[in-house]
Amino acid sequence: MLQRVLAAAGICAPILFAIGFVMQGFLRADLRLGYNPIAQEVSDLTAGPFGWVQQVNFIVFGLLIIAFAVGLSRGVRAAASWMVGPALVGWNGIELMIAGFFPRSENAAGHIYDPLGVHMMNGMIFFLNIGIVLVVLSLRFARDERWSGLALYTRVSGIALFVMSVLNGYFAEAVGDPLHPWLGLFQRMILAVWFLCLLILALRLWRVGRRDVDTHLVAPSAALSSSMRSDQAATTGIPRWVIVFGIITLLLLLTVVLIEITTNGMGGMQMSIPRYLSTIAYRGETL
């Protein structure tokens, strides 16, 4: 039954988060220059007097995703210890919580900026991560007959998310980019693909949890033995999870740093490496 509760967390997570930022897009009137969902990112809602609402939205979303990741680790068989998809899903949840703990700010002129640069850096890594995570997760699905039917869909979704995130970075993030006036719409398209995949996976986890309940009722001793073997396999695979995750995160972080060095900023926010602790320019204005 715990597995079905964790599946419910995965079902509720994208729905509640989407309702939260959509409603704020219509109701928020505290930002000096207003809010345009077509042109502005979801993260801009963390600024302003009522920015705490979106901060809470991020944190709750992250916690629910972490719970869903625990459900995946319990509900998908680990054919090999290096198949770390559920652990990476949990890391996505942590990144969402970081977005809530490090919000954007609004200056006196009404321009929204990232005072520390943490939100921006975390967001870049997050959007590059979510596609890779789904691809890694699909490898584990392919080894479990209960999930193999979703392996191809999950992999294709992951590849599509990665490509869309890269295109977003090159053609929409910066002020002068051709798709920048539709930055918010482009980001919401990326989120829609990810949310749909999360919902489908969560619904499958719900079905798997229901079958597991039936299995325990029919053959409790056999199910308990299988669960113990699965937990043992997961435990022995934890060190490799950390290694794989560390390598992926390090590569993505190095990529973002190289982008910052070579382009002197991305998405209109310019960060000069020697001065990044004291000066951050957003949309061409030094703050």
Image: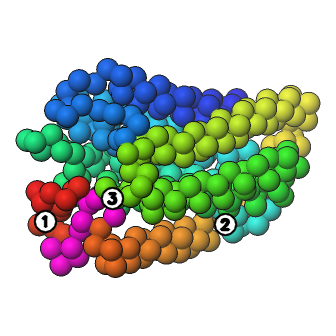
Under mark 3, the amino acid is: Gly
Position of residue 194 measured from the top left corner of the image (x, y, whole percent)? 59, 44
Instruction: Identify which amino acid the numbered label 1 is placed on.
Output: Thr
From the viewer's perspective, is 266 left or right of 223?
Answer: left
- Determine the residue positioned at 54% across, 70% down: 248
Q: Earlier in the sequence, mark 3 or mark 2?
A: 3
Location of the N terminus by quadrant is top right
User: What residue sits right under mark 1 in the picture?
Assistant: 279
**Mark 3, secondary structure of its residue:** loop
**Can you tell which of label 2 and label 1 is closer to the viewer?**
1
Is residue 183 shown above or below 255? above
Disc number for residue 176: 3
| Whether residue 254 can be seen here | yes
Q: Residue furthest left?
A: 108
- The quarter of the picture where residue 204 lies is top right
Answer few, some or many: residues within 10 Å of disc 3's Cα (few below 14, many 20 plus, some between 14 and 19). few
Contact (CB < 8 A) between labels 1 and 3? Answer: no
Segment tinted magenta in the rendering: 266-275
Q: Earlier in the sequence, mark 2 or mark 1?
A: 2
